[in-house]
Image (spheres, coloured by chain):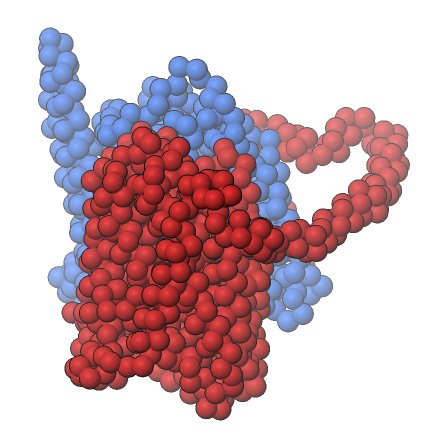
Chain colours: A red, B blue
């Protein structure tokens, strides 16, 4: 069983890919079969993932690879492969479970869309690419799937292509991530140059194993940082985070799948996968590349949490919270808490998908309205959505005990607190924790509490096909915490390969109280500030945010996303425009002039040869100079269909070949 | 050598011959029943179901026979030689017999079950006999046996080409093919007899030994060139290609597919063996400044002429099948470059390329056949707007055309890549650069006409306003599935070329 799944690991991503191709080849009127194909592909992938996961439980630190030769060129052999280890297996299960819930949800959410089948084809394609990414055992294979994931997200963000804002967001996402990918690809090339292989694990000769790392030496820092560029782009880290909030233009299930649970996780996953490159030559767990990761992560986490406070779009708030949480994961990886970061990644996959699908349900119930200021009181109309959303909110805020996000966040705090170089990241993250609780409280008050406002008046609960995935994910988010507690840190042990044992005493730790106090503070302050949000209060009109009323300048700064987009527009983008205009001018006048010049020479030559032709040779030949097509037509007439001519041609051809032979001899 | 052992070693061929006879018998019996059924016109529905069942049985039996033959090949020993090279079994012959049978298998699948040709049993029997011809060609290292294989293949193909008796073009194409083919056969036979006269043997390895010590004589040159002419005809290299456009356009679609695929692959295998084993001492050089007499400059001349004429004339075509015929000439030229480069790598590159090409062309002809059945023609105008009628076929055709043009990540790209890079490394100072440059120029031109086909499919408005969308789940299902499988194979071999390339390289000694 074990060996079968290792050698056939490629089947996991193959299922969704096959489903995608099958959907594309059926007519776009066969909506039911398209949805059935997509869900079936996902279910099979889930079953295989579970088989893979079970097989990794046999031994601690299980790792099996299946490498094969892609192609041989001269004496160079390019090899690719798949790897099954706890990291890959955990990601496989998370992606397929969350993916399946989102697929089912989409059947309800997209029911009215005219391009229903195309949507499921893209969704399956995306799922396949992401599954391939996590099991790849070669940096090149990772890069290939990485780009496929990027392509899928481009197609899905711009799914409602008739909306100009969706088209623009798709382009922005693609181009911004490409900037990071450029660095990534340079890193791939550099690594291949140094280590001579791109395989991660290859019986001791892979680039992440002893011999390969030894060959890298000092260049590991640069390779790691270049690879990190790709991760920054994909995981929406500062300064390339700008695409992620705009990507909310896509349908909400897409936001849930791509921009919450899986695709943005790819960056964090990549750093975790090539962690030996980052930590090579570490002195007490600190290297320069990891330090960069920490500071980028801290900046991102705090900045995004601040911006999230001032957003009014339900999905944008979640988008910024995603950016913030990803920053937190990066910090965790950077300070050496790899297992903590990945655990938070897995937990985040569940509760963020839950939140996004909940937001989708809210938007569906409010007939497409996304502005939280126009909602309110929805807990009465949408009880299931409210309950599940509350679970997601608790998990995201990091409430300990029953919600998975709490335990993982606590682990991250724990890891960060003992980072040797500086305590600043730790304190900044504590601020981030408070802010997270604050903006989630604000959102939930605006959406579910108070009086129903414009959009909430005709609200209704979503159909069962949409609420069922919510319930499943909510239970998942709660049950997952069972394997995360410090009393029985099973997942931690599974990922690190250390044995785990049960010990209730470890449940009570100072960090637990710090965490509990901070989250409670965030929620409490949130309730106090926003208790009358959406209604008129003193001198404040109903549509003005309480914070905006108190601090208009600060609020405007945050609501406008710290003007980072505007800054880019003034600098990078306007520079690109200038370069483009310059190239355009060069093309039009300089190069074109050059080409015209050559053309004129050619024309002169043509005139010369024509006159020679007309006088020297007979007049009929000049037709053949009328270009390749004309020449073809003339040759074609030689193929007249007269068999006598043909047989003559054999004799002539053979004579010519004989003459050639004789002439050379 | 007991006859029992011979029976065992020739079992794949025997299986196919027996299958052919069985299919012929079934065809005769049911054909009789059919004619009696058509008399009673009162029950047309019964007639239709009856014939379709009969053709179904024939096709299933033929496909089954081919599958059993593949099984029989897998049971053969790794390498044996019978009767001094009359029948040899090596990894190479095993691999290419399987490839030839697989191509025949897909040809059988392409035969429509909706509107089968009359006398389907006979037609299938001919396909199977031609397949035996391919296997004899591939599996022999003896000139006489090779000639017999050529004739068995050729005679079957002539009849297959002329098989559509309701179409005057088919008859014309068959006659032309026959006249052209027999003339070329005469040349080949004459060439073989001259070689025999010079060397006193017909076994390839023995010829090589004799020629190594023989002085260069004009008679030998005539023998070599004449032998090559016969094969140049088979692979449709210019200027011996003139039969190809008519045959490709006029023949029934499965026949054309078979001529373009199986026949070509087997011819390249045996041509490679003849020049690289039999004529090895008379190689010469086709390097730009260092040309010396031998078969290699002759092949280089054939290759360059094929690339130029094939690509140029294809530009002016407005019929997809004629276009494929001329492009086949060009592709024959590219493949010859591998043989000119020579050596194990060159031969492997040529074989890889021709196999890829054969797979692609069977698929392309499958699409042409399906379109032709719906619209009654195969001009560009019949392909207009195919994408809205059948996205699957349009997508498959896109894969085939782009692969022929050599666009990555499709199989055709790696085929060209191996071919050209081996040719560049074949001789010191990149002596074959001129040939590679010419081939690159040719593939550059070819992109234009392949894109013309795709433009018709994807951009042009359907020219037939009444064009019905393709019915789903019609009896075409088998053909569509076959085309889709071939397209998937082309894509797969582009992504994982080593699956085939490494096998071919390993099979070569």
In the image, residue A402 above or below residue B194: below
Q: Nearer the viewer, residue B219 or B97?
A: B97
- Which residue appears at 74% of the width and 31% of the height? A626
Q: Measured from the top left, where is residue A75 in percent x and y?
A: 50, 75
Q: Measured from the top left, where is residue A657 in percent x and y?
A: 61, 50
Q: Nearer the viewer, residue B260 or A152?
A: A152
Tell me if residue A395 can be seen. Answer: yes
Q: Nearer the viewer, residue A196 or A434?
A: A434
Q: Residue furthest front?
A: A538
Q: What is the tally of numbered marks visible in this picture?
A: 0
The picture quadrant where one finds residue A138 is bottom left
- Which residue appears at 16% of the width and 60% of the height? B8
- Which residue appears at 68% of the width and 30% of the height? A630
Q: Nearer the viewer, residue A271 or A48?
A: A271
- Which residue appears at 45% of the width and 37% of the height? A160
Q: Measured from the top left, where is residue A533 in percent x and y?
A: 42, 46
The picture quadrant where one finds residue A60 is bottom left
Give the quadrant of the N terminus of chain B. Answer: bottom left
Give the quadrant of the C terminus of chain B. Answer: bottom left
Q: Residue furthest bottom?
A: A283
Q: Residue furthest top?
A: B42
Q: Measured from the top left, where is residue A590 in percent x and y?
A: 84, 47
The picture quadrant where one finds residue A64 is bottom left
Image position of A370 (left or right of B460): left
Image position of A266 (left or right of A75): left
Tell me if residue B145 can be seen. Answer: no
């Amino acid at each position: 069983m074990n060996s079968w799944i290792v050698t056939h690991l490629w089947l996991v991503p193959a299922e969704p890919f096959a489903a995608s191709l099958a959907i594309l080849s059926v007519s776009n009127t066969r909506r039911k079969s398209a949805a059935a194909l997509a869900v079936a592909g996902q279910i099979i992938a889930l079953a295989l993932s579970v088989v893979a996961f079970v097989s990794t439980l046999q031994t601690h630190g299980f790792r099996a690879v299946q490498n094969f030769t892609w192609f041989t060129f001269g004496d160079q052999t390019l090899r690719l492969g798949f790897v099954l280890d706890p990291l890959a297996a955990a990601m496989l299960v998370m992606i397929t479970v969350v993916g399946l819930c989102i697929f089912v949800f989409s059947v309800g959410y997209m029911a009215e869309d005219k391009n229903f089948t195309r949507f499921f084809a893209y969704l399956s394609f995306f799922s396949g690419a992401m599954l391939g990414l996590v099991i790849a055992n070669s940096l090149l294979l990772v890069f290939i799937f990485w780009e496929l994931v990027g392509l899928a997200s481009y197609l899905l963000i711009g799914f409602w292509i008739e909306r100009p804002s969706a088209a623009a967001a798709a382009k922005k996402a693609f181009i911004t991530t490409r900037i990071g990918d450029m660095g990534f690809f340079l890193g791939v090339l550099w690594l291949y140059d140094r280590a001579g292989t791109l395989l991660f694990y290859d019986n001791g000769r892979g680039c992440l194993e002893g011999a390969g790392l030894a060959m890298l030496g000092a260049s590991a820092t640069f390779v790691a940082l270049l690879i990190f560029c790709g991760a920054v782009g994909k995981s929406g880290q500062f300064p390339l985070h700008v695409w992620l909030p705009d990507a909310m233009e896509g349908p909400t299930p897409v936001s849930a799948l791509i921009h919450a649970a899986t695709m943005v996780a790819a960056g964090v996953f990549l750093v975790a996968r090539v962690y030996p490159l980052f930590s090579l030559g570490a002195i007490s767990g600190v290297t320069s590349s990891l330090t960069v990761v920490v500071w980028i992560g801290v900046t991102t986490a705090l900045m995004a949490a601040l911006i999230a406070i001032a957003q009014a779009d339900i999905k944008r708030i979640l988008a910024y919270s995603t950016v913030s949480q990803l920053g937190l994961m990066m910090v965790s990886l950077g300070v050496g808490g790899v297992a903590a970061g990945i655990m938070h990644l897995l937990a985040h996959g569940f509760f963020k998908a839950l939140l996004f699908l909940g937001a989708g349900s809210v938007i569906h119930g409010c007939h497409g309205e996304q502005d939280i200021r126009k909602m309110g009181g929805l807990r009465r109309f949408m009880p299931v959505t409210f309950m599940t959303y509350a679970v997601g909110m608790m998990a995201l805020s990091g409430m300990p005990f029953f919600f998975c996000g709490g335990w993982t966040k606590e682990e991250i705090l724990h890891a960060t607190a003992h980072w040797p170089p500086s305590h600043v990241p730790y304190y900044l993250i504590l601020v981030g924790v408070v802010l997270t609780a604050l903006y989630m409280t604000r959102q939930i008050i605006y959406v579910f509490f108070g009086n129903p406002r414009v959009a909430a008046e005709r609200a209704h609960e979503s159909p069962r096909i949409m609420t069922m995935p919510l319930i499943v994910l909510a239970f998942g988010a709660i049950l997952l915490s069972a394997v995360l507690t410090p009393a029985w840190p099973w997942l931690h042990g599974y990922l690190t390969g250390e044995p785990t044992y049960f010990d209730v005493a470890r449940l009570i730790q100072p960090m637990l109280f710090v965490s509990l106090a901070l989250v409670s503070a965030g929620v409490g302050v949130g309730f106090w500030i926003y208790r009358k949000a959406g209604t008129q209060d003193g001198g404040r009109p109903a549509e003005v945010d309480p914070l905006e009323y108190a601090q208009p300048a600060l609020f405007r700064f945050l609501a406008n996303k710290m003007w980072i987009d505007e800054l880019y527009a003034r600098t990078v983008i306007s520079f690109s425009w200038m370069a483009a205009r310059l190239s355009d001018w060069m093309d039009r006048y300089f190069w074109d002039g050059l080409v015209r010049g050559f053309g004129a020479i050619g024309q002169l030559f043509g005139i010369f040869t024509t006159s020679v032709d007309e006088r020297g040779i007979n007049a009929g030949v000049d037709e053949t100079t009328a270009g390749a097509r004309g020449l073809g037509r003339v040759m074609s007439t030689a193929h007249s269909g007269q068999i006598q001519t043909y047989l003559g041609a054999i004799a002539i051809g053979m004579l010519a070949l004989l003459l050639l032979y004789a002439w050379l001899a | 050598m007991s006859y029992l052992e011979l029976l065992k070693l020739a079992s794949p061929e025997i299986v196919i011959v027996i299958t052919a006879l069985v299919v012929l018998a079934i065809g005769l019996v049911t054909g009789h029943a059919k004619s009696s059924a058509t008399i009673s016109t009162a029950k047309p529905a019964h007639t239709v179901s009856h014939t379709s069942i009969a053709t179904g049985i024939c096709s299933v039996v033929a496909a089954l026979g081919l599958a059993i033959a593949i099984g029989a090949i897998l049971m053969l020993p790794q390498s044996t030689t019978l009767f001094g090279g009359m029948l040899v079994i090596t990894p190479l012959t095993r691999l290419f017999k399987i490839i030839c049978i697989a191509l025949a298998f897909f040809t059988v699948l392409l035969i429509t079950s909706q509107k089968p040709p009359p006398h389907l049993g006979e037609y299938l029997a001919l396909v199977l006999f031609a397949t035996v011809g391919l296997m004899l060609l591939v599996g022999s290292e003896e000139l006489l046996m090779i000639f017999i294989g050529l004739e068995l293949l050729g005679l079957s193909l002539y009849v297959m080409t002329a098989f559509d008796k309701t179409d005057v073009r088919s008859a014309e194409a068959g006659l032309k093919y026959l006249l052209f083919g027999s003339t070329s056969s005469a040349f080949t036979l004459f060439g073989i007899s001259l070689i025999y006269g010079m060397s006193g043997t017909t076994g390839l390895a023995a010829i090589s030994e004799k020629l190594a010590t023989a002085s260069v004589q004009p008679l030998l040159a005539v023998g070599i060139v004449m032998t090559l002419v016969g094969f140049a005809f088979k692979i449709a290299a210019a200027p011996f290609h003139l039969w190809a456009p008519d045959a490709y356009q006029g023949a029934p679609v499965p026949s054309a597919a078979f001529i373009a695929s199986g026949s070509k692959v087997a011819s390249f295998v045996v041509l490679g063996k003849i020049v690289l084993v039999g004529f090895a001492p008379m190689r010469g050089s086709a390097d730009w400044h260092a040309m010396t007499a031998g078969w290699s400059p002759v092949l280089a001349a054939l290759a360059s002429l094929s690339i130029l004429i094939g690509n140029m004339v294809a530009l002016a075509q407005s019929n997809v099948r004629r276009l494929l015929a001329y492009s086949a000439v060009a592709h024959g030229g590219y493949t010859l470059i591998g043989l000119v480069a020579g050596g194990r790598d060159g031969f492997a590159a040529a074989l890889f390329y021709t196999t890829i090409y054969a797979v692609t062309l069977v698929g392309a002809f499958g699409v042409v056949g399906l379109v032709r059945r719906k619209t009654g023609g195969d001009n560009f105008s019949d392909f207009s707007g195919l994408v809205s009628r059948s996205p699957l076929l349009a997508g498959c055709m896109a894969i085939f055309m782009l692969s022929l043009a050599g666009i990555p990540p499709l199989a055709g790209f790696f085929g060209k890549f191996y071919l050209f890079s081996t040719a560049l490394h074949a001789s010191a100072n990149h002596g074959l650069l001129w040939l590679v440059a010419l081939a690159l120029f040719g593939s550059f031109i070819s992109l234009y006409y392949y894109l013309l086909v795709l433009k018709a499919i994807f951009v042009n408005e359907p020219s037939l306003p009444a064009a019905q969308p393709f019915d789903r789940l019609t009896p075409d299902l088998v053909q569509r599935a076959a085309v889709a499988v071939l397209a998937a194979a082309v894509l797969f071999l582009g992504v994982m070329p080593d699956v085939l390339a490494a096998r071919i390289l390993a099979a070569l000694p």
